[in-house]
Amino acid sequence: MKKHGSILIVEDARESLTLLTELLSAEGYAVRSAGSGDLALASAAANLPDLILLDIRMPGMDGFEALRRLHADDATRDIPVVILGAATGTAERVEVLKLGAVDFVSKPFQKEELLSRIRTRMELSRSRLKLREQAAELARVNAELMNNIAKLEQSGEALRESEAFILAVMDNLPIGIAVNSVDPGVSFSYMNDNFPRCYRTTRSALADPNGFWDAAYEDPEFREVMKKRVVDDCASGDPARMRWTGVPITRKGEETTFVSAMNTPIPGKPLMISTVWDVTEHMRAEEERRKLDRKVQHAQRLESLGMLAGGIAHDFNNILMAVLGHAELAMVKLSPMSPARNALAEIITAARNAADLCRQMLTYSGRTSSTLEKIGLRELVEEMAHLLKTAISKKALLNLNLGRDLLPIRGDPSQIRQILMNLIINASEAIGDRSGVITVAVGATRCDRDYLESTELGDAIPPGLYMHLEVADTGCGMDARTKARVFEPFFSTKFTGRGLGLAAVMGIVRAHKGALKVYSEPGKGTTFKILFPALTEGQEVARSPASSSLADWRGKGTILLVDDEESLIALGGRMLEHLGFTVLTAADGLQAVKLYRERGKEIDLVLMDLTMPHMDGGEAFGELRQVNPDVRVILSSGYSRDDVAGRFAGKNLAGVLQKPYTLAKLTEALSAVMPRAER
């Protein structure tokens, strides 16, 4: 495999070092490693790497000191250093950048983000080195040129020899160099071959009287701007103004390139030395870095909003748990003829609606539970066709463009229907009272890495075959500012509404390991394209087991109920006693562990909240297993059941209850692990 450059990894953690070595070696880099700051300095001095990945936390000499010494040494000062470290505050990031680091990647890192940053930094380093070499060569040649011009005036023979030497040097320079008049007409006394090549024109075109501007700058408007700028800068006599960086050179039907240029007046002569060099590679590397920074900032912003939405939903679920649970218990106790039953039914309905809102917020944060099945997108849309027609404006025409012989996907049918309904309703509202067309299409798309990087969430999924669901409308469209915020929770262009529709769509697609792409312009309509991984032959789909009626189920035994919310302790105790259990309670993990050590022999099961002060449910579960490896524990949480179950996979967890849970859900969880009471 062709090596793309050498990288020195400085990391004391063996697992992290092995992971980084395998990852970077697979990408074609020559990798070597050092386990401490001292070894890193010795290795870098002995054989300069192209880039250093430096862990900030190490025994002995830490990353800060190693970075300080690398930057203080002339031999290693210019090696780009990318810091690896756990998420830290702004002050620590600023400190390492002041010490000379070029970038900071937080642990745990995303593979594609790390590789992209390394590629960008390697390209920037090479570009800077090349520019530094060209600048040094330019300064040397300029000095030599000026020196030889003085000598040429003193000796005819020396003039001929020096002229031949200078011409030979300049003709073989990797940069363009010319001698020309100082007037705006720009007539040339000399130019090397690279001079017209940098401007992507010919020597003859530049040699025409007044031909430089037309030959160098094809666009008339930009030509006049550059001409005025260059003439004014040269007239100022200020050397700093007679240097131009990143000037675009455009040709119709061709890719734009970029050059930097510099003019140096020749003392006592109406001439100047014009130098130009290609900086296209450097400019593209800088643009890639800016794109990556914007993408990372956007992803971090959405992640922060998701964490906020998930946190709000978690706390609100605790409140709903008390409302819903007490209402259900009261309903059980009331006579069927009681007039209060209707009021309680309304309370239960309202609480469940609020719980649905919480689920939408958890969906946005990617923490919702899903029931995965094999789904055919064509069949799903066909089943919903009548419902979709009733959901849109009567002035809107619904077109279906459904591909045939498509592979299925793995997904939650109810969530996919929610995506489609949200997009259809948005499309109808975008059309408004005007006539318009809404098109729903399903098909297959083979996505490469470049295409996925142009989508939302595409960075986290691999290239390959995807089934797409597309909803397009001929409505009002969106401007760039609206499109940039369209997936934020609570953002809405409507006068009313919660603004969770598209945010929930984003969360569902993230949970399905898919991606989204939005095309929209004001007045030209909008298209949402949703990508789902194709379910290839041989892949299995987990199915949820069927549940039977447990309305009359009653258990027996003693349950330790652990929660930091007093209202939920009271409610949970009543629900468990209603189901026939003896209840012990604890307000946090520490109390629960202490009580279990004292009375563990009489406790048949622990029902414990996951999020608590002092010691949370996860830590308490570990402590309880040390006391009794066979302890039965059910964890409850306002977050997704799947998230919690995945976190404790393989640790003999008896079950997970997602808040707010009903009496029926509690009965279902307990019946799976506790014996039924004899009647």
Image: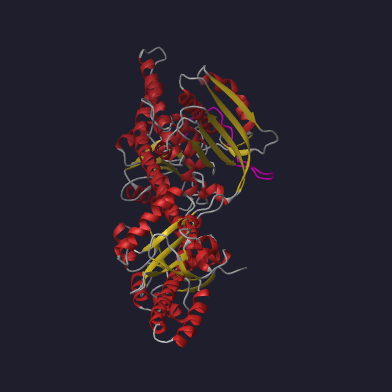
Viewer-proximal residue among 472 and 371: 472
Horizontal side, residue 96 vs residue 640: left or right: left
Horizontal and vertical percent for residue 397? 56, 21
Residue displayed at 45% across by 79% down: 43
Asked whether the viewer can see residue 167, the reply is: yes
Residue displayed at 48% across by 79% down: 166
Viewer-proximal residue among 122 and 592: 122
Horizontal side, residue 646 vs residue 559: left or right: right
Quadrant occupied by the N terminus: bottom right
Horizontal and vertical percent for residue 288? 47, 56
In the rendered image, the vertical position of residue 209 relative to residue 347, given as above or below = below
Horizontal and vertical percent for residue 328? 40, 25
In the rendered image, the vertical position of residue 18 relative to residue 137, given as above or below = above
Q: Quadrant of residue 313?
A: top left
Check if residue 36 falls in the magenta segment.
no
Asked whether the viewer can see residue 638, the reply is: no
Predominant secondary structure in magenta?
loop
Q: Quadrant of residue 353?
A: top left
Tally of numbered discs: 0
Viewer-proximal residue among 207 and 169: 207
**Which stretch is magenta?**
533-555
Give the colour scheme of this rendering.
secondary structure
Horizontal and vertical percent for residue 91? 29, 60
Check if residue 536 falls in the magenta segment.
yes
Viewer-proximal residue among 363 and 45: 45
In the rendered image, the vertical position of residue 19 relative to residue 427, given as above or below = below
